[in-house]
């Protein structure tokens, strides 16, 4: 059975290592070797929550994502990625930090073993939004590849057109485009689709549940364990 669980990065170094190796292999397939969210200093960061997709019995890792809460110790990956191109990202992050905190969904990936099941394109981003209610944040950011912009829109994010070229940047390579997206209020899911809103609210109400998910390749059961230990650490 597939299990999706959350934990603070320093609490499970072995799982973090599996996450890093799997993510790096996937990026290398597409010729991407330099990406800010793939830096490894987050493994010691208590403000980084790891979302891990794994086989519950064998502990084989099939994918994951991170939700990194802004702090004075580590900049959000999005700041490192685009700050040199548009300094307004610094002010935007600071404003959200001052009004209650912000975070970024980053490092999202899934292995070929689960390709076509909707884990990378639907489930991980949904979980990322769901768990923000356990964190000291009021907003979230995400830097999307073109194929994942629709994912952000489904979750209620908007394209942050104040930055870059109407929200667009050439990143992580000159021939690739990334879009800055933002959920200004994690409590306000009014822009999300009805289906996504209901699923997110369900995961917020009950972080531990078994769900039969339906993806392009059919049905599969997932056990969700999304309760974050010491959420206000």
Image: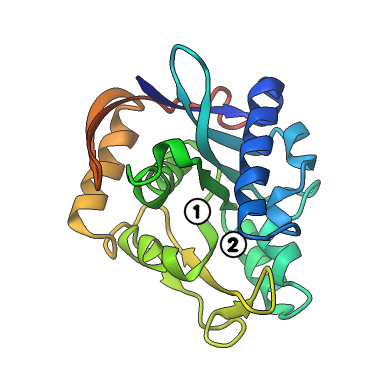
Dot 2 surroundings within 10 Å: few (below 14), some, or many (20 or more)? some
The residue beneath circle 2 is: 96
Residue 86, x across and y down, in percent? 71, 80
Visible residue check, residue 107: yes
Q: Quadrant of residue 131?
A: top left
Residue 167, x across and y down, in percent? 54, 80
Reply above or below: 65 against 184: above
Question: Closer to the camera, 30 or 82?
Answer: 30
The residue beneath circle 1 is: 138
Q: Quadrant of the N terminus?
A: top left
Residue at left offset 23%, top offset 60%? 193
Question: Closer to the camera, 124 or 229?
Answer: 124
Question: Closer to the camera, 188 or 75?
Answer: 75
Residue 221, x across and y down, in percent? 26, 26
Left or right: 94 as drawn, with respect to 207: right
Residue 81, x across and y down, in percent? 72, 66
Reply above or below: 164 against 48: below
Asked if the residue at tag 1 contacts the one at tag 2, i.e. Cβ–Cβ closer than 8 Å, the answer is yes
Residue at left offset 59%, top offset 36%? 49
Q: Quadrant of residue 210?
A: top left
Give me the C-alpha separation between circle 2 and circle 1: 7 Å
């Amino acid at each position: 059975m597939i299990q999706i669980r959350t934990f603070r990065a320093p609490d499970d170094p072995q799982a973090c290592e599996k996450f890093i190796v799997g993510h790096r292999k996937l990026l290398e397939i597409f010729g991407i070797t330099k990406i800010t969210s793939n830096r490894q200093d987050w493994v010691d960061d208590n403000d980084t929550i790891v979302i891990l997709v794994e086989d519950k019995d064998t502990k084989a890792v099939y994918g994951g994502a991170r939700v990194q809460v802004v702090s004075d110790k580590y900049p959000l990956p999005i700041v490192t990625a685009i700050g040199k191109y548009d300094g307004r990202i610094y002010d935007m992050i600071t404003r959200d930090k001052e009004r209650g905190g912000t975070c970024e969904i980053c490092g999202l990936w899934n292995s070929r073993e689960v390709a076509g099941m909707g884990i990378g394109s639907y489930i991980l981003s949904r979980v990322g939004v769901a768990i923000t209610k356990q964190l000291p944040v009021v907003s979230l950011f995400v830097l999307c590849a073109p194929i994942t912009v629709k994912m952000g829109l489904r979750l209620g994010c908007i394209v942050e057109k104040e930055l870059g070229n109407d929200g667009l940047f050439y990143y992580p390579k000159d021939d690739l485009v990334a879009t800055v997206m933002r959920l200004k209020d994690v409590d306000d899911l009014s822009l999300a689709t009805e289906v996504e809103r209901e699923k997110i609210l369900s995961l917020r109400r009950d972080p531990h549940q078994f769900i039969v998910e339906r993806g392009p390749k059919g049905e599969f059961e997932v056990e969700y364990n999304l309760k974050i230990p010491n959420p206000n650490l």
